[in-house]
Image: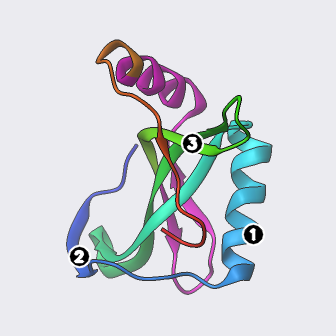
Amino acid sequence: MNPSVIKILEERGEINDELDYALMNYLLKNRGVGYTACQPQLVELEGSKKAIKMNIDHTFVDKDNKLMGLGIVGNIYIEVDSLQVVYCTPAEELVKNIEKLKEAGIKPQPRPKGKY
């Protein structure tokens, strides 16, 4: 179940390369190919726990070898003190959300280099 965010502590931020790598590894192992964690926010969850909330973008390489993104299909929450994943949108829901974006006529967009 998606955690309840009580308050956004920082609207935008950055994560270090080690956490970025760990999240990419987690998503590949647990959700499959085609997902990128992006747009980190520092939030407070129920129980006064601080977490990093990140959106999950559906990403792929197009026929011209460009990194593309369809859009946000889920979320992942990482507990700040332990850096453990406390929630990640289930794989089935990610797939359903991709289909919803496609059915809505959303067109993939080029993704910028670096963090976003």
Horizontal relation, residue 83 to residue 6: left or right = right
Of circles 1 and 3, the one toward us is 3
Q: Which of marks 2 and 3 is nearer the N terminus?
A: 2
Of circles 2 and 3, the one toward us is 3
Q: Marks 2 and 1, Cα distance to the nearest angstrom?
A: 24 Å
Where does the magenta region start and end? 76-101
Please report contact status of discs 2 and 1: CB closer than 8 Å, yes or no.
Answer: no
Where, by quadrant of the figure, is residue 11 drawn?
bottom left
Q: Residue sitting at 23 percent across and 76 percent down?
A: 8
The residue lying toward the viewer, choosing from 65 and 31, is 65
Q: How crowded is mark 3: few (under 14 residues within 10 Å), some or many (20 or more)?
A: some
Which mark is on residue 68? 3
The residue positioned farthest toward the left in the image shown? 7
Residue type at the position of mark 3? Met
Instruction: Quarter of the image for the N terminus: give it.
Output: top left
Q: Marks 2 and 3, Cα distance to the nearest angstrom?
A: 28 Å
**Is residue 85 placed above or below 102 in the rendered structure?**
below
Please report contact status of discs 2 and 3: CB closer than 8 Å, yes or no.
Answer: no
Q: Residue sitting at 68 percent across and 76 percent down?
A: 19
Q: Which of marks 1 and 3 is nearer the N terminus?
A: 1
Q: Residues within 10 Å of mark 2 (few under 14, many from 20)?
A: some
Q: How is the structure coloured here?
A: rainbow
Of circles 2 and 1, the one toward us is 1
**Residue 13 on image: x %, y %:** 41, 82
**Residue 71 on image: x %, y %:** 42, 40
Dot 2 corresponds to which residue? 8
Dot 1 corresponds to which residue? 21
